[in-house]
Image (cartoon, rainbow, N blue to C red):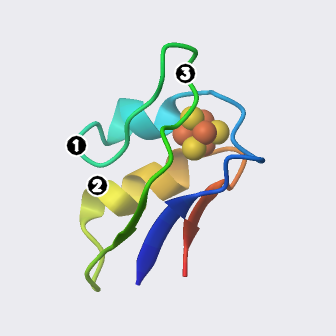
């Protein structure tokens, strides 16, 4: 599967980075740095935690 950030929906809460700093990164304003990469299934717990932590549902797994 592919993990990416919908930057139009990201509101800069930085919660993804707070729970999974090895997976997500944020800029100086707290907005997620765009990513676009393949992830294994079953998902790494850190990936799941980051997705669950995002209040804007801007982390996309497809
Ligand atoms: S938690 Fe969601 S809204 Fe907040 S920085 Fe991360 S991707 Fe953006």
Residue at image point 61% right, 27% down = 13
Placement of 27 over or under 45, stated as above or below: above
Left/right of residue 42 with respect to residue 3 in the rendered view = left
For this rendering, which residue is in front, 36 or 52? 36
Disc 2 + disc 3, Cβ < 8 Å: no
Q: Which of the labelled discs sits on residue 22, or is there none?
A: 1
Q: Secondary structure at mark 2?
A: helix
Which part of the image, by quadrant, shows the C terminus?
bottom right
Q: Which mark is residue 34?
A: none
Disc number at residue 30?
A: 3
Q: Secondary structure at mark 3?
A: loop
Of labels 1 and 2, earlier in sequence is: 1
**Residue drawn at (29%, 86%), measured in percent from left and top?**
41
Name the residue rendered at 25%, 81% in the picture. 40
Q: Label 3 near label 1: C-beta < 8 Å?
A: no
- Residue neighbourhood size for the residue with mark 2, other residues' Cα within 10 Å, grouped as few (<14), some (14–19), many (≥20): some
Disc 3: residue Cβ within 8 A of ligand 1's nearest atom: yes
């Amino acid at each position: 599967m592919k993990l990416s950030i919908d930057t139009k929906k990201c509101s800069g809460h930085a919660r993804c980075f707070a729970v999974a700093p090895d997976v997500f990164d944020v800029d100086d304003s707290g907005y997620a740095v765009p990513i676009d990469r393949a992830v294994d299934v079953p998902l790494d717990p850190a990936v799941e935690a980051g997705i669950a932590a995002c209040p804007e549902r801007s982390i996309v797994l497809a």
